[in-house]
Image: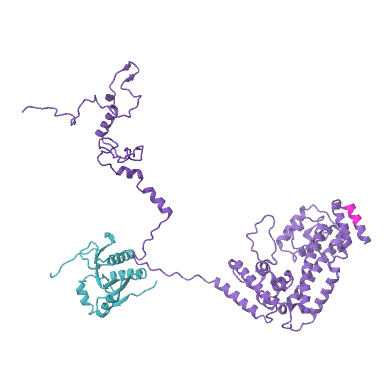
Chain colours: A cyan, B purple
Amino acid sequence: MSSFLLKTLTKKEEIDRIIRDTIDEVLVLRFGRCTDTVCLQHDDILAKSVTDVSKFAKVALVDVDSEDVQVYVKYFDITWFPSTVFFFNAHHMKLDSGTADHTKWVGAFHIKQDFIDVVEAIYRGAMKGKMIVQCPVPPERIPKYQLLYKDV
Amino acid sequence: MATLEDSFLADLDELSDNEAEMDENDGDVGNEEEDVDMDMADLETLNYDDLDTVSKLQKSQRYIDIMQKVEEALGKDSDGAEKGTVLEDDPEYKLIVDCNQLSVDIENEIAIVHSFIRDKYKLKFQELESLVHHPIDYARVVKKIGNETDITLVDLGDLLPSAIIMGISVTSLTTKGSPLPEDVLQKVLGACDRALDLDSARKMVLDFVESKMGSIAPNLSAIVGSAVAAKLVGTAGGVSALAKMPACNVQVLGHKRKNLAGFSSTSQSRVGYIEQTEILQSTPPGLRARASRLVAAKSTLAARVDATRGDMSGINGKALREEIRKKIEKWQEPPPARQPKPLPVPDSEPKKRRGGRRLRKMKERYAVTDMRKMANRMRFGTPEESSLGDGLGEGYGMLGQAGSNRLRVSSVPSKLKLNAKVAKKLKERQYTGGATTSGLTSSLAFTPVQGIELCNPQQALGLGSGTQSTYFSESGTFSKLKKI
């Protein structure tokens, strides 16, 4: 049981730095609040799998309550917490999970294996040069949501 | 000598089964007086009535000399051993060597006396010998019981464990022995006393050796302790003899063979005096075998140092002991905890393609056969033969063609299920044409009642008269033409 704490980022420079400095590894950024229950569940899964994927992925948490970070929240259009965004070599990786939004994963993962599968799929796709990958999680375990377009 | 001859004659009269041994005994009598050393050949002299002819050690000069010296030495304290002198020249060392030899001799002597007692006492209580194994214990028990018929009156509590006492009392009720005559009894008791004397002498000798062991072999005693060191040196017959032994022999010095009546010796651990050392007593039983090997090895090294008198202070021995202790402690450590292993990077390890004979044989089972290859090719300009003829069914390609090497067309069994119309046509063709119809087929039908009857066999098969046209007959034309 190592890594009881995942790194939490609160400033824009930190996020920039980590995106730039993660080379040849999938970067998993979770946007959320540490007090939310769904976020806690999601964070638990992330913490448990961090050692397993440590050779090809890095995990960091972004606290959505700080002002610096709002730029990113707006950029990625994050409205539901937790939302997970994947990067590889500073490219934003998209994930087609059958939902409306491919740019991120919304909600918590159900089991640890799901998360590891998603990270592996992204890694394989990215190494091949793809920008979007198919989600290997079966649809019953994908959190469903509806996109409501506001002011568009 | 006269008494000896008389006892011979007496034996001749009493015991009938000694006739064979009489000749050998005559020969022995001659060199008895010259031969001071005890051999196992002397077991043959056991059937004498007189103990002294059997056990001569106590009367021998050597024995008396050594015992005297030992008592002397035990009385005074010896000065510190001179460093640097060769071990063999030290007079005290010589005494120790003699003592070691003597203790071995005494042990043999005790065995002989024990056989003597046993043989005489057999007439009284035969089973006692198998119940009490140790010769000294046996002698004590015999002395206590004497000529008593009722064993329950005898108190054996301080001599033996209670389980054996119980066994003795039980068997004594069913023993077929009879009380001994008085003179035999006296001889037996005398022999018991002799055995006990020898035992106490041996103890004294061993104590002496043990007390001197610190100056004789300091390194060895540092490892195994002086008592066990004394025993080891005694059994080996000197420090140099012990040093010359390989460690595996040192390990089993003093091992008591206890496998009675067919018990396997694989369950016994082969450890001798080493088992009594403090080190081994304090190791957990699972590690005892390994530890005994280690202790035997290191003590052999120490004995070698002592034989050459290289280190009289015992520092070497202490260092070896420390080493042994550390090793045993290390064995008892728990194994290191397992670290969770991270998953390997995907696609980082290329798939190991295996080759070799086995894989080739496996692939052969699914490879395209030569026959199929021939069937796949076609000759230019000639229509190929096919299994159903006329281009239907599977084509045979180059199989069976004149130019090819294959002489025979072995049909590849086709998995096609023919549909009804094609099957019917095939049957029809089979009947009418075909070079391969059997010569014994005929179009005649034999009916039992009317004899030979010409009957259309195709009708029987439901093929009709053969001229019946089907609805869409390929040979037929329109069935009904109506002029409009």
Instruction: Check the image and name the residue furthest to the left.
Output: B484
Whether residue B398 can be seen here: yes
User: Where, by quadrant of the figure, is residue B99 drawn?
Assistant: bottom right
Q: Which residues are magenta?
A: B8-15
Query: Which residue shows up at 21% across the image and 74% down it?
Result: A73
Is B259 on the left-hand or right-hand side of A117?
right
Between A152 and B39, the residue placed more toward the observer is B39
Q: Position of residue A2 (x, y in %)?
A: 39, 73
Q: Residue B259 in the image: x percent, y percent?
A: 68, 58
> Residue farthest to the right?
B2
| Quarter placement of the C terminus of chain B | top left
Above or below A17: residue B339: above
Vertical relation: B176 (above or below) B40: above
Q: Quadrant of residue A60?
A: bottom left
User: Is residue B11 one of those drawn in magenta?
Assistant: yes
* Residue A34 seen anywhere in this rendered image of the structure: no
Residue B320 percent coordinates (x, y): 62, 76
Residue B450: x %, y % from top left: 32, 15
For the N terminus of chain B, give its image quadrant.
bottom right
Q: Based on the displayed image, in which of its 4 quarters is residue B73 positioned?
A: bottom right
Magenta stretch, overall SS: helix
Taking depth in this image into account, of A5 and B36 the one nearest to the observer is B36
Magenta stretch containing residue B441, yes or no?
no
In this orientation, which residue lies closer to the viewer: B219 or B31? B31
Would you say B341 lies left or right of A127 here?
right
Count of numbered tags = 0
Q: Residue furthest top?
A: B450
